[in-house]
Image (spheres, helix red, strand yellow):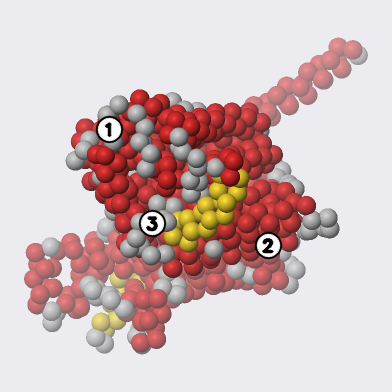
Amino acid sequence: MTKTSAESGQVENTDRLKSQIRSPKSVHILSPYIERLKAGDALLADTPENLIEVVGVLKSYGIVMVDYYTNLLYIAEKQFLVLFPFFKYFNGEVSREKLLRHLWHDRINFEYAEYCMKTMMWHGGGSLDTYLDSEEFRQRARAAIEAKIQDNWLIRGIDGLFPEFLLEQVRQQVYYSALGQFWRVMAPIFLTLSDRYDRGEINSIPQVVDHILNGLVESANLPITYSVEIGDKEYEIIPKSANLTFLMDTAVPYVEAVFFRGMPFLGTVSFNAQAHQIPPDQTRFEYGALYADPLPIGGAGIPPTLLMQDMRHFIPDYLHDLYNRNRRREDDLRVQICVSFQKSMFCVTTAAILGLAPYPIDTKDPSEEQANRVYLEKWMDRFVTSRLMVANSDPNACLYGCEVRF
Amino acid sequence: MLSALIWVPILSAAVLGFWPGTITPKASRQLSLIVASAVFVWSLVLASQFNPGTASQQFSEYIPWIDSLGLTYHLGVDGLSLPLLVLNSLLTCIAIYSTDKSIQRPRFYYALLLLLNASVAGAFVAQDLLLFFLFYEVELIPLYLLIAIWGGKRRGYAATKFLIYTAISGILILAAFFGLVLLSGASTFAYEPLRNYTLPLTTQFLLLGALLVGFGIKIPLVPFHTWLPDAHVEASTPISVLLAGVLLKLGTYGLLRFGLGLFPEAWSIWAPWLAIWAVVSVLYGSFNAIAQTDMKKMVAYSSVGHMGYILLAAAAATPLSLLASVFQMVSHGLISGLLFLLVGVVYKKTGTRDIDILRGLLNPERGLPVVGSLMVLGVMASAGLPGMVGFISEFLVFRGSFAVFPTQTLLCMVGTGLTSVYFLLLVNRVFFGRLSKEVENLPQVQWSDRAPAIILAALIVMLGLQPNWMVRWSETTTTTMMLNSQELTANSQPF
């Protein structure tokens, strides 16, 4: 009897051991975040202050995003191969008032959208990048180019001498359009998030993540297409048959390029390079939104400054109230917006991680758990040098009186 | 007219200090600010009525006081004292305005500030040696108390050191004054009559030596400078502004007025050594400034260096160099006042002056960008960059002294280069780069914190672009001083 009981206990222990071997707990330095994600939480700590910051800043982001994508699509479609696009930010409405407003700089900084577009183009990635190197694209683009420059002998000459020049311009136009289409989907997601928050339907950070995730999933297979009208004829440069879709061909490359990689910009040398934050080569480039130091915001030539400058016009009152509780009140508004923006981007990234996970994140199947763990650890590898831990222990957050869980 | 500059603040200080009823801290501050502003406006009125075409004393007031001592209440102002008088009243206004509103024992504090203002003004306008000495000594009391009561952690040590040094300075000056009167056989301490007495050269050396050490402590010149960095570090910001801006000038003013004015012959013989002393002060002060990690100490050592220029110019005693010495006094008063104000704001907001801790304060959003910009302007002025008052004063010093002491002047010019070195170190470490983590969340800077510094910065630029506004006050006086010195030297008989 005793022997049987011992044998039975031994079998139980062996099963438990086998189970642990199959799906051990992660020993990653950021394993607490893996556990959080598995528990249905987000990368960002769920605090009332974080919720206000994230929803408030995404609302203002959504508003400026509408202007950004409107302009990106205008440039892609109406400024096709206009080599000196002096009025590209005017969306076709050139007036003295608008010009003065533009010169006075009290305007939406469309340059920021272009910065993101260039970042996407520089880093490439996804089927869109592959398509732009395909023969099909080359033929379609050439047809449009020929149509556009047929009466322009000077440009025809240049095209003859440098046949890749206009082709590269078209590739850039494609990215204008792709980012415009991506933001055209994202803006309503953020704005409806704010509406739901105002109605009391969003009460936690995980709910924010769910909202974004649902929006991404709903739009995942939307086609990405691009065509321009030259004369009376429409030229399809990215046809629907290219099978480029919203999630994998714009959202994922965008997250990779803008959230993770970033690109050099004026001011980099004076601020970030001095702080050894800029790696010397592109492959090791980690200066995306999740890594960016918010403190250089406000410095000349720092692109996020433009975004924060735009967003500050649309900050909801509840977020202003929160910022005004800072010891510096709103003197450093743009930096505070950037800090909040970074937090919100960790929520968007959480949604992307959950959406792209190989199996449901709360699966109990050991092999699926194992695959998810490997998947999540790869993400965590990238977060080690990010601002994740800073975002969760922001000095501002302490000043606001919130408690950080980790 | 001149008495108002002395007695209005003294009476106001008495009211603040001894009024039996309650005076709220706000009322104390407002009253002292009103009085100081009135004194400043009055000094400007006097300046507007000042006749720059004559070197004689103007707005003179004479009241016999203690005949048996030869002491008279004789006041007057000339092109040497007028700029310093205006500077004193301006910096007092700024010191009162920039004082922390929640300062402890405000009635006593503001009363002492007004007393300090009055005694310094009295020293600048006194035309009687004993009267000058009285004001010179009275000034020590409020300054000692202002450091000892409202200073930093080691305020007791710093204040006592200051008191010992400056008391010795006073004893030496008094001894020289008594010696002059007794040995010359004069019956009065009145300045003008005493200038006409000729003493044997050895006696002149002795008396001038006492004055040089006495005023050398006050300026301060190396090796009598050690009280100054301690006093500056421990003094609160407004007191540092006054200390560097005005009080050190009592030393250089005394050297010019009494050293050069009363003993021109001995002065001219010792001049090459004085110029060497100036070089030592300039270089020692500058090298020490480079080695500092405390911003305030760096500015304090910078003062030691820059006051050396005045000695160089006074030693050369050419019309241009004497004018330069006056200009350099005002220039240094404005620039050091600005720098100490800005260091004070940095300290108030960050809690440290350590340049090894501070970084990136020029950050436009979370740093102190206006303060940083003004600091850049201040250090550029101090380093003598064109367009600012520091350039004019240093150029005049070097231009005026080079013909007499080329080697010493060139060595002093090295000091200007060193000024750029230590202030670039300061600006580069404290204001450029990424904001250091220790100061990432600084409190708001109010315009009231910046306003005094902006006023001084504006004056630094204005006088840099239009130096003639000040030069015209002093030019006749300094030229006449030089001519009188030559005349007295020529007339004196060798002993």
User: In the image, which disc is placed on residue A164?
Assistant: none
Q: Position of residue A60 (x, y in %)?
A: 57, 68
Q: Residue at x 26, y 42 (%)?
A: B486
Q: Residues within 10 Å of mark 2 (few under 14, many from 20)?
A: some
Outermost residue on the right side: it is A1
Residue at 14% from the left image edge and 64% from the top image edge: A163
Pointer 3 with pointer 2, Cβ within 8 A = no
- Disc 1: host chain: B
Residues tagged by mark 1 and mark 3 found on one chain of the structure: yes
Tag on residue B30?
A: 2
A227 in relation to B154, above or below: below
Q: CA distance from mark 3 to mark 2?
A: 37 Å
Q: Secondary structure at mark 2?
A: helix
- Mark 3 or 2: in front is 3
Q: Kindly state the secondary structure of the residue where label 3 is placed.
A: loop
The numbered mark 2 sits on a residue in which chain?
B
Separation (CA) of disc 2 from disc 1: 57 Å
